[in-house]
Image (cartoon, rainbow, N blue to C red):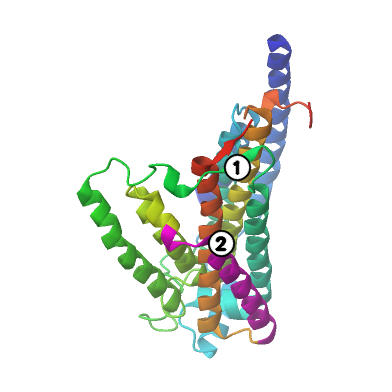
Amino acid sequence: MSKGVNGVRRLRLCLMAAGALGFAAVFTLAVLGLQPFGGDVHPYGDRAVRASLLRGTPNTVSSVNFDQRALDTLGEELILVASALAVVVLLRMVRREEEDEPGRHRYGPADVFEALRVTGYALLPVTVLVGVYVVAHGQLSPGGGFQGGVVLGTAVHVLYLTGDYRALDRIRPVPLFEGGEAVAAAAFVVLALAFAGLIIPMNAVVGVEVGCAFILVLAKFFEQALLVRETG
Amino acid sequence: MAWAAYLTAGWIVLAGFYGIVTSRNLVHVVVCLSVAQSATYLLLLSVGYRWGATAPVFSDIRPGRPVVDPVVQAMTLTDVVVGATVTALLLALTVQVSKRRGTVDPDALRTLEE
């Protein structure tokens, strides 16, 4: 059995080597046909910058995402919703499993220093504030809904990192974030189809949506790791 | 030398694929896929790079100053988002595989159902 598996592995590696050589050759040929690295020819970039300045958006990347290519961002947004939904569906309780009450376990407050826990509570509002800043300032400076949403979505998990799962469970009621995710996604569809170019509201909606999606996905992984057990 | 950044992207793809092919653990496969995907960030940003240029944000620079290509930067942002969602989805699948089959070794997963 193990000999067969080894043979299969060697065969797979040979196949991979052949494919890799082919890829390397074709990729190198393609690269030699590209503009030299760092060159001055960027026709799309120059036009995007001009269009963005014409519309008065200093952050050109935001302008490309939410104004010039808003329809593409809509697709990206729907990929995010679909995959968050898929994670929630995949990690639902299945037969022969049940979920423990969060309070039944001492996942937190774990054995951490009191100072660490206080640091967690102190960092939470600061992190949320940074997230809101990154979302709100996305039109003017590097940042925007996607980046700020990730900061917001991970901000609440500072509490878990500093050892208090129950506090995390209290401040993020999952149904609320499921609703937020759905409402924000719907709002983004409307904005992208009818009002593309309203960068500030689009950034805000994307920030809410990305934040909710991250919280939902991480909540499901936490449930699997901490609360779900097989009943036999 | 001028093409080193592009060729590095190709090298990273192959490194990621090598990891996937030789992997003994599905979590490791997911991470290797992320490595392979990160090559696309490098490729996109290299395509948009311009010597002596700055970030394409005009809050504190005068219009007319050369900036790097914002279109590929926006594409890279899309790429990062899609990469994160793919990773989350694959890890969720890995959790279920581990629960149902009791293993995360790809070589031990021969058929769909045993």
Frontmost residue, B75 versus A213: A213
The residue depicted at 56 percent of the width and 61 percent of the height is: A213
Q: Is residue B62 left or right of residue A185?
A: left
The mark found on residue A213 in the picture is 2
Q: Earlier in the sequence, mark 1 or mark 2?
A: 1
Residue A81, how many percent across, how many down?
Answer: 64, 63
Q: Relative to A96, is B38 above or below?
A: below
Q: Is residue A97 visible?
A: yes
Q: Is residue A96 left or right of residue A109?
A: right
Q: Relative to B62, is B23 above or below?
A: above
Residue B48, how many percent across, how many down?
Answer: 54, 64
Quarter holding the C terminus of chain B is top right
Describe the element under mark 2 as helix, strand or loop.
Answer: helix
Tag 1: residue type? Glu
Q: Is residue A69 visible?
A: no
- Circle 1 residue: A98
Describe the element under mark 1 as helix, strand or loop.
Answer: strand
The residue depicted at 57 percent of the width and 64 percent of the height is: A175
Frontmost residue, A79 versus A88: A88
Residue B40, how many percent across, how many down?
Answer: 59, 52
CA distance for labels 1 and 2? 24 Å
For discs 1 and 2, the disc positioned in front in the rendered view: 1
- Pointer 1 and pointer 2: residues touching (CB < 8 Å)? no
Point out the stretch of residues depicted in magenta.
A170-194
Frontmost residue, A58 versus A117: A117
Q: Is the residue at mark 1 from the same chain as the one at mark 2?
A: yes
- Marked residue chain, label 2: A
Q: Is residue A118 left or right of residue A95?
A: left
